[in-house]
Image: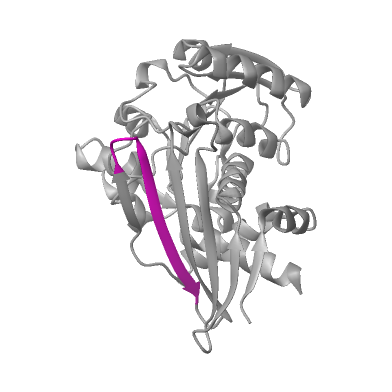
Amino acid sequence: MVKVVKLEEIKQILQNIDPIELIEEGFIAYSKGKVVVPPVGEMIFDEPLGECHIKYGFIKNDDYFVIKVATGFYDNPKLNLPAYDGLMLLFSQKTGQLLCVLLDEGHLTNIRTASAGAIAAKYMAPKKIKRIGVFGAGTHGRLQPIYLQKVLNCKDIITWGINEVELEIYEKDMRDLGFKVQTTQDPEDITSTCNLIVTCTPSKKPLIFADQINESTHITAIGSDTPEKQELDSAILKKADRLIVDSISQCMLRGESYKAINNGTIKKEKMIELGKMIVKKELQRQTDEEITVVDLTGVAVQDIQMAKAIWKGTS
């Protein structure tokens, strides 16, 4: 009989799991060619603004394969509904049988994305973080600072957003979690004071530009996960001393790197895959003076790792 695991049980199992370690192992396996990840399936909606992503794949010679469906409908909060939803399906790689339905409501996608952001900072952020700048006051804008605490020690954050009411709620909630918080609607308040910046919005036009980026800055770009989205001026990727991507093949089709390659600002050869960087220290940040960018589009191996861990936690 197919097992159905709901969000409450998933959250309980997550308490005994280190998602950062799992996701890191997944990226390494992916960059070693041990993971099969077909192209992303997606549907983009205009009225209302929303999207549905289908990501799927398997680790070679493993016991399982996973199909993940995740949605983001950005006007949902106006209806008192969460912006994100979704589920994961875990199948046997030996028989093709469906073993488990994870009704995570998009939570596992959010956690694996937050974990990837922490991994990016672990290897690429400057040693001393002055302040964390966050673009976006939604779910990812909250989870990124929280998960960054697992790899660095800085609770001073400044967050940009376009909705004053959302920013007020964000500031209160994050202060309750022990953060020193400032909010802003001026991007330069972030670029002028932060040497670790995380962008996690669904923007379709750049929020920050190359002339705003100072020496010793690291940027983790998370929001641009479709061909239409863009949070960074492409000149930032050209200016960067190191450009790390979660998947070279996927970032040729979506994300900040896709935009920069497509408009001729950079060449494919500048991209270094995250899993390769993790195992080769010479590819990681070498000095605090470097400008670095990590472009995360979300790879199915992250979903595979999360789904497997939850399934094993139900046994």
Instruction: Please name the residue shown 28% across and 37% down the image.
Output: 46
Q: Quadrant of residue 137?
A: top right
Residue 131 in sight in this render? no
Direction from residue 297 to residue 284 in the image, left or right: right
Instruction: Please name the residue shown 24% across and 35% down the image.
Output: 265
- Residue 105 % position (x, y): 57, 51
Direction from residue 200 to residue 2 in the image, left or right: right
The C terminus appears in which quarter of the rendering?
bottom right
Of residues 210 and 3, the one nearer the viewer is 3
Instruction: Please name the residue shown 58% across and 81% down the image.
Output: 63
Of residues 294 and 12, the one nearer the viewer is 12
Residue 175 in sight in this render? yes
Is residue 299 depicted above or below 140 in this figure? below
Is residue 306 depicted above or below 179 in this figure? below
Q: Give the range drawn in magenta.
A: 45-59
Of residues 297 and 124, the one nearer the viewer is 297
Direction from residue 191 to residue 2 in the image, left or right: right
Is residue 12 depicted above or below 50 in this figure? below
- Residue 73 % position (x, y): 43, 39
Residue situated furthest bottom in the rendering: 95
Assign the magenta stretch its main secondary structure. strand
Is residue 227 depicted above or below 193 in this figure? below
- Residue 38 % position (x, y): 36, 67
- Residue 36 % position (x, y): 42, 72
Instruction: Please name the residue shown 34% across and 35% down the image.
Output: 48
